[in-house]
Image (cartoon, grey):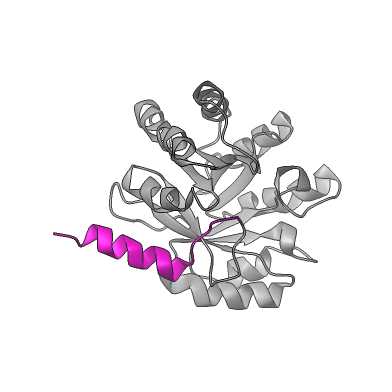
Amino acid sequence: MAPKEINPGAGKICVSIAGKDTAAALLAAKKAESGADVIEIRLDSLTSPDIEPFLRQLKTPLLFTNRPVWEGGLYDGPEENRLSPLMQAVQSSAAYVDIELQSNQSAVGKLCSAALNRPTRIIVSWHNFKETPAADALQDIFSRQHDSGAHIGKMVTMAHDFHDVLRVLQLQEIAHQKGFPLIAFCMGRAGMISRLATLELGGFMTYAAPDAGQGTAPGQLTVAGLVNCLQVFRHAD
């Protein structure tokens, strides 16, 4: 399923779904579809990952992620097995597939090559759950993402104060200059504002939880709360 068309300059809302089994994840995803531009399926949370039921039963464009423990996820097995459903998602023309920047670069290259002449867009991601690095380190990570061959970059860090938030949001200016779509915001209480602000600053996408208590990262807003905030921003006189 190809990505949904939206107004130029308007970022997307991705609702992240992490269920223990396919039935529970599908139920949560269907409930979230009305407020989502994209539904992320966290394969690493499923006891038996299978992309086909989601592709078959959901109408909203899907993003498949199989996050390893070394990047804050739940998958802790052979890398070949982790990457297999991601390749399957590309071959099935899923809208998006997320692969970590710190993955083996040949794996990133294989996914990007498989996506050629397909509607799938590859997101190359980098997360830091402890802190926000200095500006030069962030820019270096951005450059590596830009040069990776992926279609979209994703950089998410833990914010401890507003200085951290500003450093991450500043990356949107660089991304705009390079013409490289970027997802960039911060986790944690201090980073909550960035999940909204990134969309107003040219960010490609932000992430939300389907309901309270179902977030997949610290400081993640519910999709209802995020949509309400955006409506206030975008309909203000």
Q: Nearer the viewer, residue 207 or 7?
A: 207
Q: How many marks?
A: 0
Q: Quadrant of the C terminus?
A: bottom left
Judged left or right of residue 212, residue 171 is: left
Task: Indicate whether residue 228 is drawn in magenta.
Answer: yes
Q: Nearer the viewer, residue 215 or 158?
A: 158
Residue at point 56%, 24% (across, down): 137
Q: In the image as oriented, which residue stretches furthest toward the front? A: 161
Q: In the image as oriented, which residue stretches furthest toward the right? A: 78
Q: Which residues are magenta?
A: 217-237
- Residue 217's image quarter? bottom right
Query: Vertical placement of 97 versus 172: above or below?
Result: below
Does residue 175 appear in the picture of this structure?
A: yes
Q: Nearer the viewer, residue 138 or 87?
A: 138
Q: Position of residue 100 (x, y in %)?
A: 66, 40
Residue at point 62%, 59% (across, down): 216
Q: In the image as oriented, which residue stretches furthest toward the left? A: 237
Does residue 1 appear in the picture of this structure?
A: no
- Residue 174's image quarter? top left
Judged left or right of residue 84, residue 226 is: left
Residue at point 86%, 49% (across, down): 77
Q: Position of residue 40 (x, y in %)?
A: 57, 59
Residue at point 28%, 54% (across, down): 7
Task: Indicate whether residue 80 is drawn in magenta.
Answer: no
Q: Position of residue 209 (x, y in %)?
A: 54, 65
Q: Position of residue 57 (x, y in %)?
A: 58, 74
